[in-house]
């Protein structure tokens, strides 16, 4: 048999083998290629304990020292997003908008990717108000707080507001959501409570509680309901404010440089060259 014929036969056998093993399917974990539809990716992202692949960006002034934690040192929790939503890579200046941040050209970027083999290391929680209330009741319920709280006792007042919340089912979806948002409005109306939410949980007034981060709108200008719902794009999670090593996170540090904003931030590049010590990367163009 001529060499060309042998090659043709081998090629046909290889294609047949791919068919038998399922590697022509839309999703085959053994093929090295994933072509899941956006619907499947989005659905999977609502189960953060199963995906275990998270991205977080932090901007610090050049003179500020990075704490080595996912969040602020005073916080118990931090927000992260699903890495899969930023693949293929996007320009650096586009990514921060989706988790509700602003790109800072004058600041050092810490790009963090966490892939803990054990989900409990970060205990990721889809950031919905019902999930947040359940977390707060668990955390604060054993502190012996009495209700009503004394003036200025923000943590105590926070517990008093959420302790009786029940996620009551309804055939009208707006009704059940309304009950959750009704409590949230009261939380932000109390400065003492909102301060606890910010410093300990990283929850600011832009937080929707829909399980989706609100994309930055007009430099944090007031938003209508239409705008909030339209800007809610990427799932967000609350995770333990662990060290990067505890969360099995890799990090790179990128100082300001001309053209950084349009360079692509590839999560795989973070995994390849990063570590828990956040080594300096002089240019993201190396990722191309």
Image (tube, helix red, strand yellow):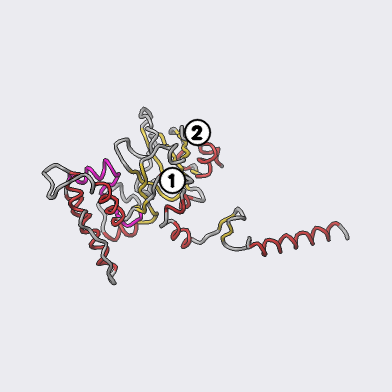
Task: Report the quarter where the C terminus lies.
Answer: top right
- Residue positioned 27% across, 60% down in the render: 225
Q: Is residue 103 above or below residue 7?
A: above
| Along the line of sight, the residue nearer the viewer: 239 or 139 | 139
Task: Determine whether, in the image, residue 206 is placed left or right of residue 115.
Answer: left
Disc 1: which residue: 55
- Mark 2, residues whose alpha carbon is within 10 Å: few (<14), some, or many (≥20)? some
Verify whether residue 201 appears in magenta.
yes
Question: Is 47 above or below relative to 194?
Answer: below
Choose top left, top right, bottom left or bottom right for residue 243. top left
Estimate how packed mark 1 is, as few (under 14), some (14 to 19) or many (20 or more) residues with alpha carbons within 10 Å. many
Residues tagged 2 and 1 counted as in contact (Cβ below 8 A): no
Give me the residue at 56% from left, 56% from top.
34
Query: Residue 278 at what x, y percent from top left?
Result: 46, 33
Q: CA distance from mark 2 to mark 1?
A: 17 Å
Q: Position of residue 256 (x, y in %)?
A: 43, 33
Mark 2 or mark 1: name the one nearer the start of the chain: 1
- Where does the magenta region start and end? 191-212
Is 149 placed left or right of 52 in the picture? left
Point out residue 187 in the picture as x, y percentages from the top left corner: 20, 51
Q: Tell me the tag on residue 281.
A: 2
């Amino acid at each position: 048999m001529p060499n060309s014929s042998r090659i043709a036969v081998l090629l046909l056998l290889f294609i047949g083998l791919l068919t038998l093993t399922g590697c022509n399917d839309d999703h085959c974990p053994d093929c090295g290629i994933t072509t899941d539809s956006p619907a499947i990716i989005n659905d999977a992202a609502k189960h953060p304990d199963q995906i275990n692949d998270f991205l977080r960006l932090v901007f610090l002034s050049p003179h500020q020292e990075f704490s080595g934690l996912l969040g602020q040192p005073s916080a118990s929790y931090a927000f992260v997003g699903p890495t899969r939503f930023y693949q293929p890579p996007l320009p650096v200046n586009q990514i921060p908008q989706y988790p509700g941040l602003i790109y800072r050209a004058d600041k050092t970027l810490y790009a963090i990717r966490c892939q803990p083999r054990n989900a409990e290391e970060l205990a990721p929680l889809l950031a919905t108000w019902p999930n947040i209330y359940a977390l707060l009741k668990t955390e604060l319920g054993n502190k012996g707080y009495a209700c009503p709280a004394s003036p200025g006792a923000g943590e105590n007042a926070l517990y008093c507001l959420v302790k009786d919340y029940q996620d009551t089912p309804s055939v009208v979806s707006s009704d059940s959501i309304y009950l959750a948002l009704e409590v949230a409005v009261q939380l932000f109306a109390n400065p003492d409570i909102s301060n606890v939410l910010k410093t300990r949980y990283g929850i600011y007034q832009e937080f929707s509680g829909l399980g989706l981060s609100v994309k930055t709108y007009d430099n944090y200008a007031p938003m209508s309901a239409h705008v909030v719902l339209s800007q809610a794009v990427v799932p967000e999670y609350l995770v333990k404010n662990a060290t990067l090593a505890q969360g099995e996170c890799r990090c790179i540090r990128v100082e300001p440089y001309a053209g950084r904003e349009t360079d692509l931030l590839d999560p795989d590049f973070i995994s390849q060259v990063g570590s828990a010590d956040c080594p300096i990367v002089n240019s993201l163009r190396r990722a191309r």
